[in-house]
Image (cartoon, rainbow, N blue to C red):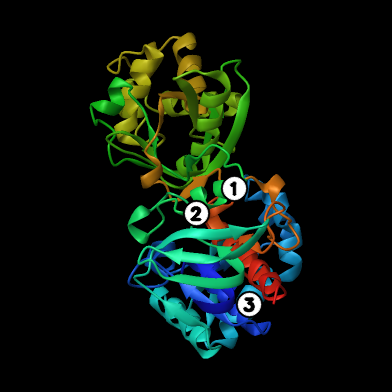
Amino acid sequence: MSNYDVIVIGGGPSGLMASVAAAEHGASVLLIDKGAKLGRKLGISGGGRCNVTNVKETSELIAHIPGNGRFLYSAFDHFNNRDIVEFFEDLGIALKEEDNGRMFPVSDKASSVVSALIGKVRSLGVQIMTDSPVQEVLYGDSKVEGVRLKSGKGVAAGAVVIATGGKSVPQTGSTGDGYPWAITAGHTITELFPTEVPIVSREEWIKSGELQGLSLRDVTLSVWNPKGKRVISHRGDMIFTHFGLSGPIALRCSQFLSQVQRKSGTDTVELSIDLFPDHHPQEVESQLQNKLELEPKKAIRNSLKGLIPERLIPLLLAKAGVDGDITGHHLPKSALQALAALLKRMPVYVHGTRSLAEAFVTGGGVNLKEIDPKTMESKLMQGLYFCGEVLDIHGYTGGYNITAAFSTGYTAGKHAAGQH
């Protein structure tokens, strides 16, 4: 049986960074991946451009990781977003900052980031085994002993880092392999659910496709609980699809929709769109009034063009109970108020999200109460470490999840090296 100080299972962002940190801290390292290529999820991140991190201040970073982001404070002490920038620039990858603190390679090619990271791993003498699925992690007397591959080969090690990802984007190899190994060690897995995922609605106007492909810019999308309390709001862009809602703010709201469903046991959840987020209802009503007074003899469905996206007008008029052929001069005050109210809170009744396999990020994972935040080591099994998406940590898209992966990966690798 061959022997290493540290075995890292999983060649994604967290596993590659764990391999680097362990080797830099003097450990002999074996990196094992079941796929033919390392860094597959990294290679498609950021729309194929690889959003390597986000340079917001730590408190802002944590706020954009609503799934247990506070757990990361200790990991950020070891390796934070600034360290990530410095790490890649030292590898010759020039980075640029785009909107909202997102950092991309100047080349706009994820492949350059993947190549540089794998090159760093190789330069440190890490042994790499691809096409080598792990059958089980070997435990004995409350400590890790190594792994056994599906080929039957055993590999001994004093520390094992599980960096196998979640269950989202399974075509990259993230199929939940790490959860059973964690359970065998005594860990609990919190409920898995899709986050950063498109939203599904069974409303007739959604199913008819009448708004399919319509994008809304700079609007606010809110999630409401059954008691009428606003749970979360996100401002930005969204798009109507043939099955529901997608686009940045819909993806961000998706996890809160799932939470409302789980907590209340309800199938249908109200979302609402505010088309004029900078204006109070009275201001919106005044804008409508002014528009109609300018063209008092024009049918209202024509008067509203330029103020409201044209494809949205028939639906809004129907929801407000207003005949589109009525002229502005004949529109009752109550109808004007109803229309203004809809522009500030247009309801969309939704019924869930697309599947976990279609999500960008997996919610849930290895219970953080059982993990030491300073080291990423299991509190239940000596020498067992976890990092990346296998943990119960999830953030919004925009460089937050990959920052958590690199940070927890580096922390796990560094401390796993201390086992030898």
Q: Earlier in the sequence, mark 3 or mark 2?
A: 3
Verify CB contact (< 8 Å) between mark 3 and mark 1: no
Verify CB contact (< 8 Å) between mark 1 and mark 2: yes
**Image coordinates for residue 271, horizontal then vertical, percent:** 49, 27
How much space separates mark 3 and mark 2, taking CA atoms? 21 Å
Please state which of residues 166 and 235 is positioned toward the viewer in this rendering.
166
Dot 2 amino acid type? Gly
Please state which of residues 242 and 6 is positioned toward the viewer in this rendering.
6
- Residue 364 seen: yes
Secondary structure beneath label 3:
helix
**Image coordinates for residue 250, horizontal then vertical, percent:** 46, 40
**Image coordinates for residue 35, horizontal then vertical, percent:** 35, 67
Q: Which residue is mark 1?
A: 366
Quarter holding the C terminus is bottom right
How much space separates mark 3 and mark 1, taking CA atoms? 22 Å
Dot 1 amino acid type? Val
Q: Which residue is mark 3?
A: 21
Q: Which residue is mark 2?
A: 178
Q: Residue at x 53, y 55 (%)?
A: 389
Task: Give the crowd class for mark 1: few <14, some 14-19, many >=20 residues within 10 Å.
Answer: many
Q: Is residue 320 left or right of residue 236?
A: left
Q: Is residue 31 above or below residue 253?
A: below
Verify CB contact (< 8 Å) between mark 3 and mark 2: no
